[in-house]
Amino acid sequence: MNINISKTADEMAQRAAACAAEAINRTIGEKGEARILLATGESQIESIKYLTRMNVEWDKVVMFHLDEYIGLPESHKASFRKYLKDRFVNVVKPKMAYMVDGEGDVKENIALLTKEIQKAPIDVALVGIGENGHIAFNDPPADFDTEEAYIIVDLDEKCKQQQVNEAGLIPWRMCRNRLFP
């Protein structure tokens, strides 16, 4: 494990993006493509911005989206799909982008996404840790026994408050990707 300490959030974002780009490029060199997972927290905004400026063969990158609010239209300012399309997908045009769709038949949407994500391991993930220790709204204590790639979870009160503080929206249910078995 490498621990990097940065003086500013911007410096940390630049370093994270450079590290991610290096890992993506190495994986493309080894496998011909890279499968990445992107989260959408406040800490990801600058990292994603810097990542899009890196020299990467984006047409060899398959991106997976980490989580989304259930019932929130993609057009809403708090939609994580909108966030990633605006800041990443429409900027670098990856080979493929699999988004979590929290509208319509959510269980069917999860099943389709799960089928795709389970085809091969994720090579690089850019994720943050929430104020209550959550990753992708997997609030502590985590369900490490699930075999599902994506599940619907209920948020705890600290997590809901963090969302209110960041986006002005109280989410009640989310999809999330299980990153750590």
Image (cartoon, helix red, strand yellow):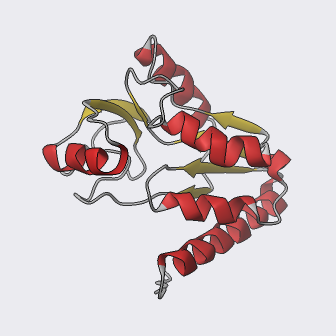
Taking depth in this image into account, of 148 and 36 the one nearest to the observer is 36
Q: Is residue 22 above or below residue 110?
A: below
Q: Residue furthest left?
A: 157
**Which residue sits furthest top?**
105
The residue that appears at 78% across and 49% down in the rendered structure is: 92
Give the residue displayed 83% in from the left and 62% down from the top.
29
Q: Residue at x 76, y 63 (%)?
A: 53
Q: Would residue 126 be found to the left or right of residue 141 on screen?
A: right
Q: Residue 14: where, in percent of width, then height?
A: 62, 75
In front here: 157 or 170? Answer: 170
Q: Give the percent coordinates (x, y) of residue 174.
A: 34, 32
Residue 52 visible at all: yes
* Image position of 65 with respect to 41: above or below: above
- Residue 124 placement, left or right of 175: right
Report the label total. 0
Is residue 24 shown left or right of residue 117? right
Q: For this rendering, which residue is in front, 38 or 1? A: 38
Vertical side of 153 occupied by 168: above or below? below
Q: Position of residue 99 (x, y in %)?
A: 58, 32
- Provide residue 134's location: percent of width, then percent of height: 29, 53
Residue 142 at least partly seen: no
State the residue at coordinates (49%, 84%). 4
